[in-house]
Amino acid sequence: MSVLDAFGLAGRVAVVTGGNRGLGRAFVTALTEAGASVAIVARDTAKTGEVLASQPDVRGFQADVRQRGEVDRVVQEIVGEMGGVDILVNNAGTCVHAPALDVTEHDWHEVIDTNVNGVWNCCQAFGKHMAERGGGTIVNVGSISGLIVNRPQWQPAYNASKAAVHQLTKSLAAEWAPLGIRVNALAPGYIKTEMAPVDRPEFRQHWIEDVPMKRYATPDEIAPSLIYLASDASAFMTGSVLVIDGGYTAF
Ligand code: NDP
């Protein structure tokens, strides 16, 4: 196999949670370009319509990743329509910006339910399916917020949730390696999406000036790393957290 062939995903079925916008949408496009058949899992299928209109080969499925029953159902639906799932990308996530003393009970649970329980629900549900068919690859979207405490928007629930995603990734990688399932995580720095208001003047110092490369990333710049972790190019990698942050956590 040539080096470039190792990145190819022809004939593979990939699932991207939250693939209708932001980083997830860039992942869907990249996976399609690499040759995979892609399923978007979104809680609001109306939002998926725009993606499906521009990428007719992509299919949309409805599930809120916080709801285990919905996740179990969507595994059956995707397998029934598209065949066995080779790649799971746990991208869906949310963030609440508030200092610790101001975080409400609702906001704490919203972040933990989505970012931790949602990732767990999908890992276990799709993991069972992958184990039955002899293997697969899972890529969880973590964050530099799981490694360091970023400023100035304090976000304790988000930071805790992404650290949990990194540790869950390593735990499952160790346990599932004998099953042929690789589990890795991406830990991106600042990316311009709806979640991250990187252009706002009050964040400029921390989100641009403090980044050694003096800028934030676009979703398209993160997507090639997803292809690396999802493909045979990373065949001997599991339990890794791949940092892509313009050098932010190097200091
Ligand atoms: P966006 O807010 O643009 O996208 C988040 C996506 O997750 C949306 O598609 C959203 O769907 C979906 N989602 C949220 N909750 C649920 C749920 N309960 N069930 C199903 N789907 C859900 O953010 P980003 O693209 O920036 O974030 C994508 C991932 O990247 C997240 O995990 C985030 O934590 C991570 N990340 C982002 C960084 C950044 O700087 N932007 C940096 C590091 C990591 P809906 O349209 O229904 O809301």
Image (cartoon, grey):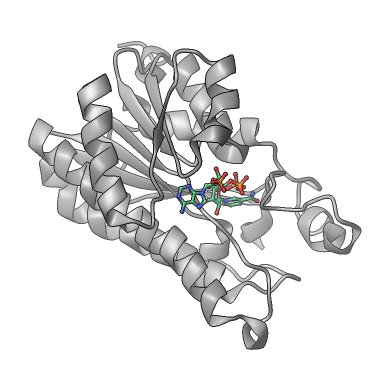
**Figure quadrant of residue 49:** top right
Residue farthest toward the front in the current orientation of the protein: 46
Taking the spot 60% from the left edge, 25% from the top edge, the residue there is 50
Taking the spot 52% from the left edge, 81% from the top edge, the residue there is 105
In which quadrant of the rendered image does the N terminus lie? top left
Q: Position of residue 239 (x, y in %)?
A: 32, 51
Residue farthest toward the right in the current orientation of the protein: 201
Q: Nearer the viewer, residue 129 or 160?
A: 129
Image position of 42 with respect to 66: above or below? above
Image position of 243 with respect to 231: above or below? below
Q: Position of residue 178 (x, y in %)?
A: 11, 45
Q: Nearer the viewer, residue 250 or 228?
A: 228
Image position of 159 with respect to 184: above or below? below
Residue 241 appears in the rendering:
yes
Q: Position of residue 128 (x, y in %)?
A: 15, 45
Q: Position of residue 183 (x, y in %)?
A: 30, 46
Residue 85 appears in the rendering:
no
Taking the spot 77% from the left edge, 57% from the top edge, the residue there is 207
Image position of 105 with respect to 92: above or below? below
- The reply, left or right, for residue 80 in relation to residue 147 is left
| Number of numbered discs visible in the structure rendering | 0
Q: Nearer the viewer, residue 3 or 197?
A: 197
Taking the spot 48% from the left edge, 62% from the top edge, the residue there is 162
**Figure quadrant of residue 35:** top left
In which quadrant of the rendered image does the C terminus lie? bottom right
Residue farthest toward the bottom in the current orientation of the protein: 101
- The reply, left or right, for residue 191 in relation to residue 184 is right
